[in-house]
Every structure is written in C-alpha cells, then in structure tokens.
Amino acid sequence: MPRYAPTEPSEDATSDQLPAQLRRQVVSYETNEAPGTIIIDTAHAFLYLTLGHGQALRYGIGVGRQGFTWSGVQNIARKAEWPDWIPPAQMVARQPYLPRWVGGGPGNPLGARALYLGNTEYRIHGTNDPSSIGKHVSSGCIRLQNADIIDLYSRVGIGTKVVVLGNDPRRASSGERDNVVLQQPAGGRMTTQIAVQPTALQISRAVSANRTGLPGLY
C-alpha cells in the first residue's frame, strides 16, 4: 500500500489540457517487438505500448533535455504508487540545492506512479507539471501526465521490456501511421549520453523550477 493515497486524478481534467496528438490513443504501429513491449520514441516525445496486429497504445511524454538523453533496452524492475522521490547522488552533485527526499503526493515530481527501469536511476513516472508533456525537459526520466501513468501502470508488470530509441528524428515517424522496425543495441546493452555539468542556462532553469514545485529536475 502506498503511504500516500490521494484521490486519483480525473481523466477528463488532465487529458483536455494536452494537444490532441499527445493524448492517449490507439495508432497504427509496425514493429518486430512482441505485444506488451514499451517503446519510447525520444525524438518525438511518444511512448508506445505495443498491442500486436500492427497497433499500439500511444502516450504523449516528456523526455530528457539536450545532453540528458539515452537509448537502449531495459526491463521494469519495480513499480510504486505515489512514490517518494530521492534525487540520485549524481543529480545532487550537479544541483546541491535539491532536497534529499520528497514524500509521495501531488507536489512530488514523480507524480502518481513510477516504473523503475533495471538497475538504472531512470524511471517512467507521472508528473506534477502537466505542461512539460511533449517537451525535452528532464534529466533522463520519462514522464507522463498522472492519468496516463496510472493507465500504463495498470497494463504492465514487473519484467516488461522497455526499448528506448535514440534522440534521432530519423529513427521513427511522428505521424498518425508509425511504421517502425527497431534496431536493437548490440547485446541489448543500454547506451547513455549524460551531461557531467549542466550549462548556466540549465542551472538557471532548474533553480527557477525548484522554486515552483520541482518540475523539470528529474
């Protein structure tokens, strides 16, 4: 049981805030991956849950900002409802003003649910900043509006395969018909491009975000 159990977000209240292309919907999507696989198109800010028969359930997402994107294959290792947020040591080193712990709840940047990817610091999670969906804003995590992460959370289990495509617009289509054949990294190993030091502009934005509920830092 989660330590915090607020009223779940209203589907209508959250979905109406998103542009039509970012709302949860079934789309045509050709892939060699098995049904039930999560595929993240970083370049176009979409997450696909493959359904088989050339279709997928597509969600609008927020993804890593420049220098904080990554690609590879992972599996869901853990699931949590209304999770606490403990900033990773690497993030704290870059941004020492961050809190060391934020309890689960509506003000938590991880939102209503979190899906933890392998042994990495990365998660697919909700957000307390719905306006960030569709943008390249995070430190590498994948965020969905809370109503969407609750929906995805209910559809996937521990061990679900997660394929993260590189931040290359040529790798996938953002149109209504998405014909994609995945090229797996050698040996299925994850590759990362994590910036060691943020730019002055990134720091300035992070400080500003920290004053308004911590969006954009995770």
Image: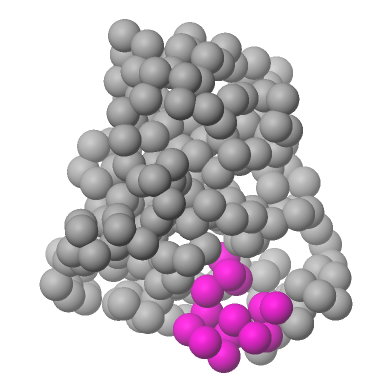
- Give the quadrant of residue 125: bottom left
Residue 37 at least partly seen: yes
Q: Residue at x 60, y 71 (%)?
A: 217
Horizontal side of residue 31 vs 137, given as left or right: left
Does the magenta run of residues contain 215? yes
Q: Residue at x 35, y 18 (%)?
A: 55
Q: Nearer the viewer, residue 79 or 143?
A: 143
Depth order, front residue of 100/183: 183
Quadrant of image for the C terminus:
bottom right
Q: Vertical placement of 14 versus 55: above or below?
A: below
Kindly indicate the quadrant of the structure image that contains residue 72. Answer: top right
Say above or below: 182 vs 173.
Answer: above
Q: Position of residue 65 (x, y in %)?
A: 69, 57
Color theme of the render = one colour
Left or right position of 210 against 195: left
- Quadrant where the N terminus lies? bottom left
Q: Position of residue 75 (x, y in %)?
A: 45, 35
Horizontal arrangement in the rendering, residue 194 relative to residue 43 (left or right): right
Would you place residue 79 above or below residue 198 in this image? above
Residue 213 or 23: which is nearer the viewer?
A: 23
Magenta-span inclusion, residue 74:
no
Residue 204 lies, in percent from the top left, at: 75, 82
Q: How far across and how far down the image is residue 124, in percent?
A: 44, 50
- How many numbered marks does the figure carry? 0
- The answer to whether any part of residue 113 appears in the image is no
- Give the magenta-colored segment's residue range: 205-218
Residue drawn 76% across the image and 72% down it: 202
- Residue that appears at 53% across and 52% down: 134
